[in-house]
Image: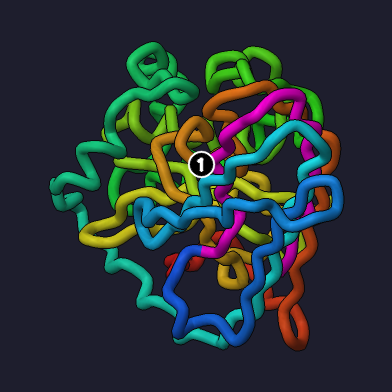
């Protein structure tokens, strides 16, 4: 997996970057992060901060100029996590409570009535989140670039079109409105076309979490977690903390050894 991102920095700035794969050093066969300003390595190396679910954030301080960031990693094959068991009762803990609350882009409190009426025919139980993701897949048109950073789940529902983050936000909001804890995960997604950072959903299933891709554009078992949060506000790949910075370009690539796995988007799958 790899990404190359370039920014134009107009004044001394501080950025928070989330492009590194979540995990520990022992899981990586090779990993490199390069940060240059006008072609030269920056004087102050990025500092790494641990975030939720094994995520890693890099804080970068840069003067004015052309800031280029390159990340690449190879991950050793890991044993797939055991999918969560199908139980009628969702275990309530701190993670579940956080994933039930409305958030910036997922206003589940505003969608309760709609979810109860429109999704009344969905069978309740451990598979309801998967049914919600399937409903979103059938309801929306996937169109990259059709939304902007201010669009919420309600905006997406009304527009009927969106990108992966919009599909995920709508699925999360509806799951929460139905009482199912759900959150967003930014991932590297082999097989995604056009290639980019990808957003999927994790929904609580019994004592564990099931990953759902409402776009159905990439096999879930090949996804690599980057960042996890309530919605895109928590998982943005870059956030300007101070200064003026414009994103100029971004390029993402990711592959797996051998053929991509098949995915019926029905069998429960969990992310490492």
Q: Give the colouring mode of the picture.
A: rainbow
Q: Quadrant of residue 253?
A: bottom right
What residue appears at the point 70 percent right and 69 percent down from the top-left corner?
72
What residue appears at the point 34 percent right and 32 percent down from the top-left corner?
176
Which portion, as a residue range, is magenta?
1-21
Q: Residue furthest front?
A: 43
Residue 227 location (% of width, % of height): 49, 51
Would residue 143 be seen by someone viewing this image from the given angle? no
As helix, strand or loop, the secondary structure at mark 1 comes to helix
Q: Quadrant of the N terminus?
A: bottom right
Binning the other alpha carbons within 10 Å of mark 1 as few (below 14), some (14 to 19) or many (20 upward) gives many
Q: Measured along the vertical axis of the image, is residue 89 above or below residue 115?
A: below
Residue 44 location (% of width, % of height): 58, 52
Q: Measured along the vertical axis of the image, is residue 247 above or below residue 205?
A: above
Front one among 96 and 39: 39
User: Chief secondary structure of the magenta span?
Assistant: strand
Q: Is residue 61 left or right of residue 190?
A: left
Q: Which residue is mark 1?
A: 235
Is 197 magenta? The answer is no
Is 5 magenta? The answer is yes
Would residue 156 be seen by someone viewing this image from the given angle? yes
What residue appears at the point 71 percent right and 21 percent down from the top-left corner?
148
Residue 31 location (% of width, % of height): 62, 75
Q: Is residue 28 left or right of residue 120?
A: right
Residue 51 location (% of width, % of height): 37, 52
Q: Quadrant of the C terminus?
A: bottom left
What residue appears at the point 59 percent right and 65 percent down from the top-left corner?
223
Q: Measured along the vertical axis of the image, is residue 62 above or below residue 69?
A: above
């Amino acid at each position: 997996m790899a990404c190359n991102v370039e920014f134009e920095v107009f004044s001394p700035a501080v950025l928070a970057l989330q492009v590194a794969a979540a995990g520990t050093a022992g899981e990586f066969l090779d990993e490199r992060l390069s940060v240059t300003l006008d072609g030269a390595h920056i004087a102050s190396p990025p500092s790494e901060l641990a975030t939720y679910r094994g995520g890693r954030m890099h804080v970068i301080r840069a003067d004015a100029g052309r800031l280029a960031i390159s990340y690449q990693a190879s991950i050793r094959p890991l044993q797939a996590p055991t999918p969560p068991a199908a139980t009628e009762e969702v275990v309530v803990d701190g993670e579940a409570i956080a994933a039930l609350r409305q958030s910036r882009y997922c206003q589940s409190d505003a969608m309760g009535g709609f979810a109860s009426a429109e999704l009344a025919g969905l069978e309740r139980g451990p598979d309801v989140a998967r049914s919600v993701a399937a409903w979103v897949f059938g309801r929306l048109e996937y169109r990259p670039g059709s939304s902007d950073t201010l669009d919420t789940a309600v905006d997406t529902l009304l527009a009927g079109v969106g990108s992966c983050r919009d599909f995920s936000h709508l699925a999360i909001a509806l799951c929460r409105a139905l009482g199912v804890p759900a959150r967003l995960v930014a991932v590297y997604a082999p097989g995604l076309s056009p290639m980019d950072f990808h957003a999927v959903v994790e929904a609580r299933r019994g004592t564990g979490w099931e990953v759902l891709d409402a776009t159905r554009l990439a096999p879930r078992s090949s996804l690599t977690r980057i960042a996890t949060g309530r919605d895109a506000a928590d998982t943005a790949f870059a956030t300007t903390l101070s200064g003026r910075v414009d994103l100029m370009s971004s390029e993402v690539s990711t592959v797996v050894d051998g053929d991509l796995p098949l995915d019926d988007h029905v069998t429960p799958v969990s992310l490492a």
